[in-house]
Image: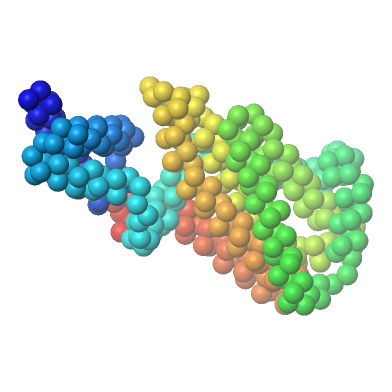
Amino acid sequence: MKVAELLERRRRNWQQLESMCGRMRFARLSMTPQEVARFAALYRAACADLALADAYQLPPSTVQYLHALVGRAHNRLYRTRTFDFVRWGRLLLVDVPYRVVRDHCIQFVFCLFWGVFILSAVLAYLESVWPEYAEQMLGHATIAELEDKFSRPLDGRNWEDNVVAASTYIRHNTGIGLQCFSGGLLIVPGLFITLFNSAYLGAAFGYMARPDVAARPNFFEFVTAHGPFELTAIALSAGAGLRLGVSWLATGGLSRGSALRKGGAEAMPMAGAAMVLFFLAAMIEGFLSPSPAPFAVKIAVAVASTMLLVLYFGVLGILGPGRAT
């Protein structure tokens, strides 16, 4: 029978699909895009073979085997897996910091962000270098708002107001991060958004640091605790977006679609780490930053936050896969 002979010749594909099902159970994340595409092709072919075997009433053993194989392959592709703490722990504690430390796009954006931030802060602080820089960068209305907002000592808020404020900060901060990340897909818009944010924030810090600004102590008491997480998250979001944008230009021999998917797989964990930092910054900004807690406590939180960032991106990033176990 021709159909039976055809299916028999396809038995090697069934065996390959069965072997890949076993591999996907334990090493799904380690499979290359080509292997995943091959698995999907074998799965579709097995579905067609099952339909032929069923229609032509081939031996029950063959039909049952194909039923089991197709069901197993389907589960590998589509089923909802239980939360794998080991896999996610390795992703968050090993893979992400390793990629961040070694990614050239992240390195470039971090240098760009902090370089522009510091330069902008210096220009806003030193009136003799560029007398109207702060006013031109921030606008007179923003400067007046900053001085008025921090003209009074921080006396805290009630619990309900803190919750609302933290929610607002989460939305606002992640919105900035998403702008930097999504703009990075086209490279130039992402770099422009990053440059603007770094220059704007640097100008605000530089202006408020002037000795003649009465609101200076209250301003720095407010921003100190949450600053390390928030500023790092902005730069990390921009770097992840740039990685995504570069991936579809420098394809490395892949098609643009495949290169973009590969870049997305590399960039999304970095963007996820940035979102976590934005959330932590918002919690601190919503509850601790406006509180009347001693300034020493807020400085201690800032130091601890900085040490955590150094530990996560520095130490764990340097250890890398195979050593951070």
Residue 286: image quadrant is bottom right
Side of 114 where 71 appears, left or right: left
Query: How many numbered dots are placed on residues in this image?
Result: 0
- Residue drawn at x 65%, y 66% as measured from the top left: 283
Residue 217: image quadrant is bottom right
Q: Is residue 105 above or below residue 255?
A: below
- Of 22 and 239, nearer the camera is 22
Q: Is residue 34 above or below residue 116?
A: above
- Residue drawn at x 74%, y 74% as measured from the top left: 160
Side of 185 where 317 appears, left or right: left
Residue 290 appears in the figure: yes
Classify the position of the N terminus by image quarter. Answer: top left
- Of 71 and 154, nearer the camera is 71
- Residue drawn at x 23%, y 48% as measured from the top left: 72
Q: Is residue 288 above or below residue 121?
A: below
Residue 23 appears in the figure: no
Residue 307 in percent (x, y) is at 53, 62
- Of 150 and 169, nearer the camera is 169
